[in-house]
């Protein structure tokens, strides 16, 4: 296998019935920490980003809005991490040749992504991380026809204007400390 042309699972998003109950469960049982929160126009939490790994901004996203009659399986999306922006660009170009719906190239500031639907309409994301953190959620369009240098410069300028801007290395260092404190404070860790 070529060392630069593989994907790893990045994170999973799940639609839930009771957001607060689910967040509490993942915090208590699996010791995830909240890394960001999506708040709706009324100030209510709509989605929560969680992680157990300071190298990953989020490994799990819990999103309210699961229909009462929804079946037990409720995957919101499957995300794959690419190793390079070229792999995301290649995926984007391949999608343009396929009969898929909802191709959406975006930047989250923290990542360059392309979202799309697979043949059975499952939502998929392929992304590569950037060097910057900004408060999530954040979405802006991106043009994968531009050069890597142009995309990088435009994204950094965009990020510098957003709340929470910091180098990702600094965000990861802070997240590692928060995770360490959360695990140390856990009753199951002390038992």
Image (cartoon, rainbow, N blue to C red):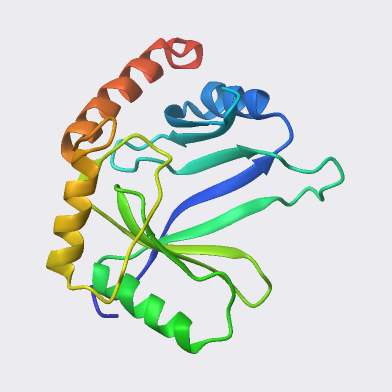
Q: Residue 159 at x, y = what percent?
A: 23, 43
Image quadrant where residue 89 sits = bottom left
Q: Viewer-proximal residue, 102 or 171?
A: 102
Q: Viewer-proximal residue, 84 or 188?
A: 84
Image quadrant where residue 9 sits = bottom left
Badge count: 0
Q: Quadrant of the N terminus?
A: bottom left
What residue lies at 17% left-to-right and 38% top-to-bottom?
Answer: 169
Q: Residue 153 at x, y = what percent?
A: 14, 57
What residue lies at 44% left-to-right and 44% top-to-bottom?
Answer: 59
Seen as rendered, the residue at the extreme right is 69
- Viewed as shown, does residue 136 lie left or right of 12? left
Against 168, residue 117 (above or below) is below
What residue lies at 47% left-to-right and 36% top-to-bottom?
Answer: 49
Q: Residue 174 at x, y = what percent?
A: 24, 26
Q: Residue 100 at x, y = what percent?
A: 58, 79
What residue lies at 26% left-to-right and 22% top-to-bottom?
Answer: 177
- Viewed as shown, does residue 68 lie left or right of 117? right
- Viewed as shown, does residue 85 lie left or right of 58? left
Against 11, residue 64 (above or below) is above
Q: Viewer-proximal residue, 136 or 82?
A: 136
């Amino acid at each position: 296998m070529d060392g630069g042309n593989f994907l790893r699972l990045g994170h999973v998003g799940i639609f839930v019935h009771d957001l607060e109950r689910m967040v509490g469960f993942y915090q208590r049982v699996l010791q995830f920490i909240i890394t960001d929160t999506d708040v709706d126009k009324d100030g209510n939490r709509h989605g929560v980003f969680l992680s157990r790994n300071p190298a990953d901004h989020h490994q799990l996203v819990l999103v309210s809005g699961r229909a009462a009659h929804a079946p037990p399986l409720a995957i919101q999306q499957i995300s794959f991490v690419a190793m390079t922006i070229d792999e995301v660009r290649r995926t984007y170009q391949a999608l343009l040749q396929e009969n898929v719906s909802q191709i959406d190239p975006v930047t989250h500031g923290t990542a360059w992504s392309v979202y799309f639907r697979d043949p059975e309409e499952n939502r998929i994301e392929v992304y590569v991380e950037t060097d910057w953190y900004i408060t999530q959620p954040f979405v802006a369009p991106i043009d994968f026809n531009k050069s890597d240098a142009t995309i990088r410069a435009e994204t950094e300028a965009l990020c510098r204007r957003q709340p929470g801007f910091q180098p990702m290395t600094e965000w990861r260092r802070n997240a590692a400390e928060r995770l360490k404190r959360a695990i140390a404070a856990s009753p199951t860790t002390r038992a």
